[in-house]
Image (tube, grey):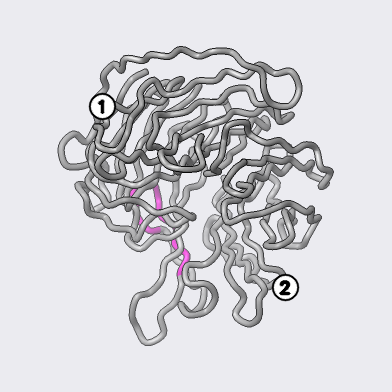
Amino acid sequence: MALVTGCDPKDPGVTGGTVSEGTTTGGSDSGGTTGGGGSDSEGTTSAVETTDGPDETTGGTGEATTETTSGGHDTDSGSTPDDFACEGGAWLFVDPEKSGAGLVSLAADGRARVFSEGLSREFDAAGTLVATVPIPMGALHWDIDAEGNGYGMFRDEDGVSPRKRLRKFDPEGVMLWERDLGPRDQGYWWGYDLAIAADGTTVYSDRAAVGDGTRMVKHAADGTPLWDLEVADQLEVSAIGASGAMVALVWNEGVRLLDPSGEELWTRPWELSVLSTAAIDGAGAVVVGTEIGSSAVKIGKFAADGTPLWDTIIEGMWGFGDLAVNASGEIAVGGEFNNEPPFRGMVARLDPSGATLATHSCDSGSWEVNVAIGDDGTIFASGAVDFDAYHLYVTAYE
C-alpha cells in the first residue's frame, strides 16, 4: 500500500448530496487552475507498513469466497494521519489538514474525482493526486459526466426575484451554460437531487410548487430543456441508465423505474430510510440499498422489467453510506463496520448475483464512505477519519 498525502486546509464536510457551500479558498487557486493547496500540491508517496493480512471466510449468497481485510491499527481520536490504514487498499490518500468526507465519481478516463468542501481532487489509477480544481462557489448536488464536465444546482442569494439555477462547467471550471429552475422559494430549499447521465443528460428533482408531489426537470447535455413535469408522488431521481431510463426512490413506497420521457415503467415495494440510494447497471437492472434501523445494510436487485432478483444483508456492515455499479453489474457498497463510535469505514464488493466477494475496513474513527466502481472492477472509496478533527481519506481496492 502507498500512502499519498496532500494539503488543502478546509472545514469539516457535509453529506446528503450537498458537496459544500462551495468555498473556493483553502489553499487552491480560486481562478480555477489546477494544483492543490498550501504546501504540497501534488502530494507525496511513501510506503506504509501493514500488519494483518487477508484471511478467507465464506459469505454472501451462494458459495462465493469472501476476502475480508481490516485495518492493522487501532486509530483513535488524537492520532495523526500517518497512523491511519485501510487494509487491502492499493493506495491511500489522507489529507493532513481538516477536511470533510468526499463524494466519488469516475470519468471515462478511469480517474476518480473526489468532491469535498469546495474542491475537486483528481486521482489516477496509482493514487497520484494529479489535479485539484475549485468547485464553483455555492454548488449543490455537484457531480460529473463521463467527460469530467461538472454540474450543480445554485441559488441566488439576493436580487428582486432570486432564482434556482442549473449550471454546467467544463473540467477546468469554466461555465458552459446556465438554465433557470424557478423561484428560489419554490420547492425544497436545495432541491431533492440532481441525476447526471454519462452523456451529460440531467434530471433535477424538487418538491412541486403546489401540493406534496414532485417536479422533475430534464435537460440535454447542451442545456436544451427536454421536459418539465410534476407527479403526485414524493420521489427523487437517483440515477440515469445508459438507455435513458431513470431510477427513483418513492418515499413511503419503494423503488420506481421511469422511461426517458418520465413515464412510470414499474414500482416495487422496498423499505427506504433517509440513508437509501439506487443505481442502474449496464443491462438496465436496478440495484437499491438502504440502512435498516441503524443495524443492517440491505441491498436488492430488480431486473429491467421489474422482476425481483435477490436481496441480501451485508454481513458486518451496520451503517450505509453509498453504492455503485459498473456496466457488467459488479457492485460496490460503502458504509461503517460499527453502529456506534468509534466507527470503522467499510467497503463490500458484490458480484451481479449478490454474492459478497470481499469486504475491507479501515481503522477506527473512519466513516461516511462513498464509493465508485470502474468497468475494470476497481473500487474507489472516500470517507472521513477523526483525528483531532475530520480529515478526508481516499483509497482504492483492485
> In the figure, is residue 221 to the left or right of 29?
right
Pointer 2 residue? 232
The disc placed on residue 124 is: none
Separation of marks 1 and 2 at Cα, in angstroms:
52 Å
Which amino acid type is shown beneath numbered disc 2?
Ala
Q: Identify residue type, mark 1.
A: Asp
Secondary structure beneath dot 1 equals helix
**Residue 245 x/y as whole percent:** 71, 51
Image location (x, y in percent) of residue 71: 42, 24
Residue pointed to by mark 1: 82
CA neighbours of label 1 inside 10 A, class few (<14), some (14 to 19), many (20+) = few
Residue extending furthest front?
340
Please report the bounds of the magenta region as a residue range. 165-175
Residue 121 horizontal side relative to residue 265, left or right: left
Magenta stretch holds residue 66: no
Going by the picture, which residue comes out furthest to the left? 39
Q: Are marks 1 and 2 in contact (CB under 8 Å)?
A: no
Nearer to me, 210 or 123: 210
Residue at the extreme bottom: 160
Give the mark count. Answer: 2
Residue 165's spot in the image, x, y percent? Answer: 45, 69
